[in-house]
Image (cartoon, grey):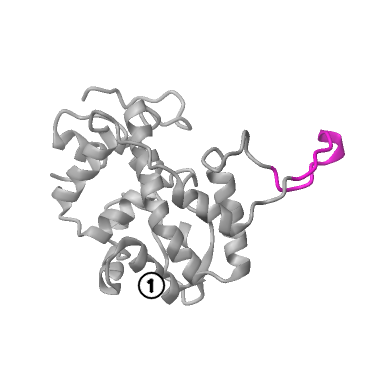
Amino acid sequence: MSEQIFNPNPCLLIGLNSPGNLEFRRHHRMLMLQRLLPVLVDVLGAQQLTDVSRDLELLYWPVLGHSQSPCFFEVPAFLGSVTPDRPMEPALVVERLMAAACPPLPMDVAPAARNLERLRKHLDLPSAQWLRLLCAYLDYGGAAWPCFELPASSLRALLASWWGVDLAAVDLALNDQLSLLGLLDQHEPCVANTDLKSLLGIWPATVQALSLSYVTDAELFAALGLSV
């Protein structure tokens, strides 16, 4: 292996923010976000869209033209009184994000890209299952997608539109395979409202392993605890 897995500070994942991985994540976050936004506009009610817009403004504030992360709540006087920022109109947030240029991919193939492709081939992952793994990796730390809840059936339909697949493919993507392999957190199906984040929970150890470079496929699978 070209990088050591020993990490003196497990809160900071080695390789996650290397230039190649950072550029890979920025590219695919914007690519997938611009596929998600029209679906959200169609599916969410006015209040949910307002809440999601505020989340997006906090996640993507540099893209939206802010000089710093906005603050939407009252700051206690003992911390220094600050007037809360006024959130942008949801239509404007969506318009600007849809018009944003997609950051380029790195010149060399990023370790994360190579490792995700190795997993796709080794596990014979169908498109939707691979996209679920990709979206989970991109959202590690809550950095990519807004937080919202929908009835389970509506969320399945949203995923189908977002990933460009049918409902049967979504059901396959949400089965237990990736959880049983230890790649993703276990999602408990719920008849009530389900939040998107719960479907994309990923273990830090998975993110760590996917972010490093390996000479052979076997080294990657060993780091993930998978048999070749």
- Residue 4 visible to the viewer: yes
In which image quadrant can residue 14 be found?
Answer: top left
Magenta span contains residue 81: yes
Q: Which residue is mark 1?
A: 157
Between 180 and 169, the one lying in front of the other is 169
* Residue displayed at 63% across by 34% down: 68
- Residue 194 visible to the viewer: no
* Residue displayed at 16% across by 28% down: 215
Please give left or right for residue 30 compared with residue 129 in the image.
Answer: right
Classed neighbour count for the residue bearing mark 1: other residues with Cα under 10 Å, few (<14), some (14–19), many (≥20)? some
* Residue displayed at 28% across by 37% down: 112
Magenta span contains residue 4: no
Please give left or right for residue 86 compared with residue 21 in the image.
Answer: right
Range of the magenta residues?
A: 71-84
As displayed, is residue 75 above or below residue 132? Answer: above
Please give left or right for residue 187 compared with residue 47 in the image.
Answer: left
Image coordinates for residue 135, horizontal then vertical, percent: 36, 51
Image coordinates for residue 143, horizontal then vertical, percent: 48, 44
Regarding mark 1 in the picture, which secondary structure is present there? helix
Between 12 and 102, the one lying in front of the other is 102
Amino acid type, residue under disc 1 in the picture: Ala
As displayed, is residue 190 above or below residue 218? Answer: below
Image coordinates for residue 163, horizontal then vertical, percent: 32, 61
The quarter of the picture where the N terminus appears is top left
Classified by dominant secondary structure, the portion drawn in magenta counts as loop
